[in-house]
Amino acid sequence: MIDGRTVRGERTRVAVLDTAVGLASVLGLEAMSLARLADETGVSKSALFAHWQDKEILQLAVVDHAVRLWTNRVVRPALHTPRGVRRLWALHERRLAFYADKVLPGGCFFAATEAEFDDRPGPVRDALAAAVGTWLRLLRTVAAQAVELGELRADTDVAQLAFETEALGKALVTCTWMNTENAMTYARRGILDRLRQLSPTPELLPGK
């Protein structure tokens, strides 16, 4: 028999982490506290403490939840696309859709939090670095598959292409904050043009 209290507790935990990821996308992780989450969610601080006993444990849980959200909204849908250049494009396009759909109030959890911890060694920085590293490895792997399939030129520098894709995605977040005109168009066109230049089969990609 399923324990109703356990189910309710898990739903509360997930709802609180959803709120925490959204807050961190605006305020960063350092502003995160049990007291702040209690105010935002209406869950008592003592109930939150039962899940997360200190700030670092909470921050690590929030990073993990942000990774799950990114995986569910960006990575998994893109992986339904055929392997090769179309899948690489889909990863970028799903990322742009994530921002356009305003899934998080601040746009991107990772863009908001990496700068906080880039020079602060410790478990939270390690978790953030691991998340970004996993994303970049995925981009490189998918690009390498496209090379193997003949859908990107054999001399394609897949690490460079992955870096450029990540850089344009990050730039879009910042430019959106600053109300830069046509930022979404530039972020989309920048990678699409690059892929079309590198691909012997550009007809697999959408038009401009």
Image: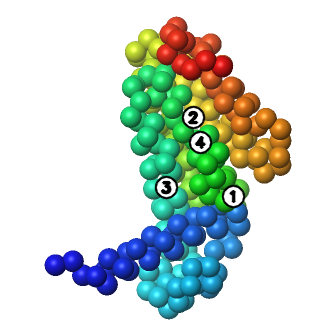
Number of the label disc, if any, that sits on residue 7: none
Distance from disc 3 to disc 1, alpha carbons, whole Å, reads 14 Å
Horizontal side of residue 45 vs 120, given as left or right:
left
Q: Residue at x 69, y 26 (%)?
A: 190
Residue type, numbered disc 2: Glu
Structural distance between the alpha carbons of marks 1 and 4: 14 Å
Above or below, comparing residue 40 to residue 44 in the picture? above
Mark 2–mark 3 CB contact (< 8 Å) = no
The reply to whether dot 2 and dot 4 touch (C-beta < 8 Å) is yes
Disc ID at residue 69: 3
Which of pointers 1 and 4 indicates the residue nearer the eye?
A: 4
Q: Looking at the picture, how far across and down is residue 182, in whole percent? A: 79, 35
Q: Which residue is mark 2?
A: 93
Mark 1 vs 4, N-terminal side: 4
Q: What's the residue type where badge 3 is placed?
A: Leu
Kind of residue indicated by mark 4? Ala
Q: Residue at x 64, y 26 (%)?
A: 191
> In this figure, what is the number of numbered marks?
4
Look at the numbered discs 3 and 4 and tell me whether their residues touch, using CB distance below 8 Å: no
> Which image quadrant: the C terminus?
top right
Q: Which corner quadrant of the image does residue 14 belong to?
A: bottom left
Sequence-wise first label, 3 or 4: 3
Disc assigned to residue 97? 4
Q: Of the residues under marks 1 and 2, which one precedes in the sequence?
A: 2
Q: Which residue is mark 1?
A: 106
Q: Quadrant of the N terminus?
A: bottom left
Side of 206 where 208 appears, left or right: right
Disc 1 vs disc 4: Cβ atoms closer than 8 Å?
Answer: no
User: Is 27 or 135 nearer to us in this picture?
Assistant: 27
